[in-house]
Amino acid sequence: ASDSRNANQYEWQFGDGTSAAGTVVSHEYDAIGNYTVELTATGQGMSNTTTRTINIQNTMEGDGTTANPYIIRDYHQLEQMDRQPNAHYRLGRDISPTLTADWDADRSFDPVGDSSRPFTGSLDGGGYEISGLTITGNQNEVGLFGRTGTTAEIYNVSVTDAAVSGTEYVGVLVGRNGGTIQQSTTDGTVTGDTAVGGLAGMNTGTISDTHARGAVTGSGTAIGRLVGRNE
């Protein structure tokens, strides 16, 4: 339908509740799985619709299990943890904007996990470092991980030279932590309003053998070098 000579309007439905218009479009899916893409071409009072099912897969090495975790090698793959937040991951090398193809150093990273779908898997830093993490905006639950569930495990993770800002529940590593953080470090600047911390904005889980360095600034309450609010 997309090459119909009589069509002058193209409507796309991507199967995940989003749509677009145009002859050539691009779309990024938030989760792996099967999606039915529908294209409707309209022109001269006629229309034609075609559909195709596509499978969005994880392109990282591994299979996401504890025995064979997905291996993360750049910032794009860090963000892709949000597509499968219950899987297990391990860093495969140092990660920075300069080591990531097609990544703008000033681009704002999309936190992994939120209130509707928290991260419940695991991340093993593997002795490597994540540098240059930048997150900007006025959103809540801001950090490398926006929100983690009770089964989440984050360990041996080092984040350096970070610049993170948000509104409520803001931290370099986790905005709102409900899981376990062990043997991890952060270094950078953190800015927010309420529940702002160098490592985590709010913690209801377990944090041990960790430390945070850098400047933490908040305009409201619950501001801390390591954790803003601990419950």
Image (cartoon, rainbow, N blue to C red):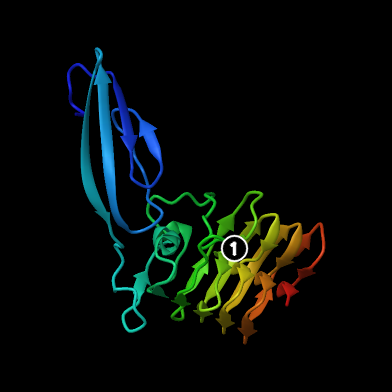
Q: Nearer the viewer, residue 168 or 11?
A: 11
Instruction: Look at the image and tell me in which quarter the N terminus lies.
Output: top left
Q: Could you say which quadrant of the image residue 12 lies in?
A: top left
Horizontal relation, residue 126 to residue 193: left or right: left
Q: Given the image, on which type of amino acid does mark 1 rest?
A: Gly
Q: Quadrant of residue 44?
A: top left
Question: Where does residue 81 sit, x and y in percent of width and height?
Answer: 42, 64
Name the residue carrying label 1. Answer: 143
Q: Residue at x 51, y 52 (%)?
A: 105
Q: Is residue 137 left or right of residue 84?
A: right
Q: Secondary structure at mark 1?
A: loop
Which residue sits at x=47%, y=49%?
104
Q: Nearer the viewer, residue 226 or 47?
A: 47
Please provide percent x and percent y for residue 94: 44, 70
**Which residue appears farthest toward the bottom when viewing the image?**
209
Q: Does residue 119 sit above or below 103 in this rendering?
A: below
Q: Is residue 20 above or below residue 37?
A: above
Q: In the rendered image, which quarter is residue 179 located in?
A: bottom right
Q: How many marks?
A: 1
> Residue, x 41% and y 54% (percent of image)?
30
- Compared with 81, 179 (above or below) is below
Q: Residue furthest top?
A: 44
Q: At x 61% / y 72%, what residue is drawn?
A: 177
Residue 187 location (% of width, % of height): 63, 70
Give x and y (percent) for residue 172.
62, 66
The local crowd at label 1, few if under 14, some if 14 to 19, many if 20 or more residues have their Cα within 10 Å, is many
Q: Please give left or right for residue 202 compared with residue 125 in the image.
A: right
